[in-house]
Every structure is written in C-alpha cells, then in structure tokens.
Image (cartoon, rainbow, N blue to C red):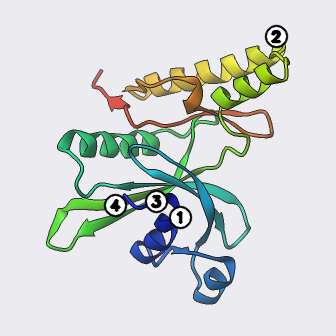
Amino acid sequence: MPSGDAMIPRVCRTFSDAFASDEATAKEQGKKYWISRVLGSGATGTVLCAKRRSDGQSFAVKVVEMEGMSEADKNRAQAEVQCLLNCDFFSILKCHEDFAKKDPADEENVLMVALVLDYANAGDLRQEIKNRAKAARAFREHEAGLLFIQVLLAIHHVHSRHMIHRDIKTANILLCSNGLVKLGDFGFSKMYSA
C-alpha cells in the first residue's frame, strides 16, 4: 500500500468522478469532494480528510486497497462496508457514500474501496485519556457518564441490527467537538442471523 501522502493522488485517479486533490480543481472539474490531508493509516487502510465542495463540510474517507489481500481480509473489509451501510445512528460513524474500483477483467473482484464517513474532529478516546493523564485532568463523573451512555446506545443499535462489532476499544471510540461520541472501525464486525 502506498504511503499516506501517495494515497491522495491515487484515490483522485481511481475515483476521478468524485475526488480532487485540491479545492480549485474540485471547483473547476465539478468534483464532489476535495482531499485536504491524510488523517492516518493502519494495517487495513488509509484515512483521508475530504471536504464536500458544495458546503465545505469535512468527512473522513477510509480507503482500503483490496488487491493482494487474503480472502479473510477481503471478507472483513466487505463486512465492514455492509455493517456501516446498515447503521444509521447518531453515535455510530455514518457511511454517507461508498465507492468501489472493480477489476475490469473480473467484475466480482474489487480492487479498492473508499468509504465517505462522518469526520470526528476531536480525535479518539484513547488519545483523549492520554492527554488528560498528562495534564492530570480526569474525566468528571458526568463527562464519563455521557461518553459511556453514547457507547452503550451505539452497541445496542449494532446488536439490534443483528451485527457484532468485535473490536470495541478506546481507539475506536471517536470524539466530536460538540460532545458526541461515534463508534467506529467496523473492520472486525460481523452480521449474524437471528
């Protein structure tokens, strides 16, 4: 997988109908989004920050290159897409759009996926806990309670949709500056039948 910075032009080429690498090009060519920067990358993908041209709203774009992945990893990536598309709840990272690049020689083979997700602009709970520990500033009881309730509601919603998250940890609990919490990273999620 290319480095984070190399991913921006690659995504713009692969999904050229939707993404541009800068605001001026997005306006000039009528693209829906322009990618402003890399937010991070991990074992399964890269997350980019994109802005919608029409209103400047920020989104996170999770890009997963599926070419060369094992079947198990491909199945996990596809399960994540399905779970995100089946969840529409205030404390779950919402998938607004998804794009897939298919192999021209084999339409069943998906080479790359880009998911346009809510952007949680205040980081994740893991980092917030570390920052507060350094500053000797613990969560107050009502702050912890609000976080906990939102996470529980998200888990309840996931289970009510016959899904299991399977990777709930502080790094996957994303924070917004308005106080909302978003459960994210459905890479290990699974749907089940009732």
Amino acid under disc 4: Met
**Residue hosting label 1:** 5
**Residue hosting label 3:** 3
| Image quarter in which the C terminus is found | top left
First in residue order: circle 1 vs circle 4 = 1
First in residue order: circle 4 vs circle 2 = 4
**Residue hosting label 2:** 141
Do labels 2 and 3 touch, CB within 8 Å?
A: no
Residue in the picture at 36% in, 57% down: 1
**Residue 147 screen position, x and y as percent:** 71, 22
- At mark 2, the secondary structure is helix
Vertical side of 7 occupied by 173: above or below:
above
**Residue hosting label 4:** 112
Residue in the picture at 44% in, 25% down: 167
Mark nearer the viewer, 2 or 3:
3
**Residue 21 horizontal side relative to residue 127, left or right:** left
Could you tell me how far apart the alpha carbons at marks 2 and 3 are, in whole angstroms? 41 Å
**Residue 120 screen position, x and y as percent:** 67, 44
Mark 2 crowdedness (10 Å alpha carbons): few <14, some 14-19, many ≥20: few
Could you tell me how far apart the alpha carbons at marks 2 and 1 are, in whole angstroms? 40 Å
Q: Nearer the viewer, residue 180 or 63?
A: 63
Amino acid under disc 1: Asp
First in residue order: circle 4 vs circle 3 = 3
Amino acid under disc 3: Ser
- At mark 4, the secondary structure is strand
Could you tell me how far apart the alpha carbons at marks 4 and 2 are, in whole angstroms? 43 Å
First in residue order: circle 2 vs circle 1 = 1
- At mark 3, the secondary structure is loop
Do labels 4 and 2 touch, CB within 8 Å?
A: no
Residue in the picture at 71% in, 23% down: 129
Could you tell me how far apart the alpha carbons at marks 4 and 3 are, in whole angstroms? 15 Å
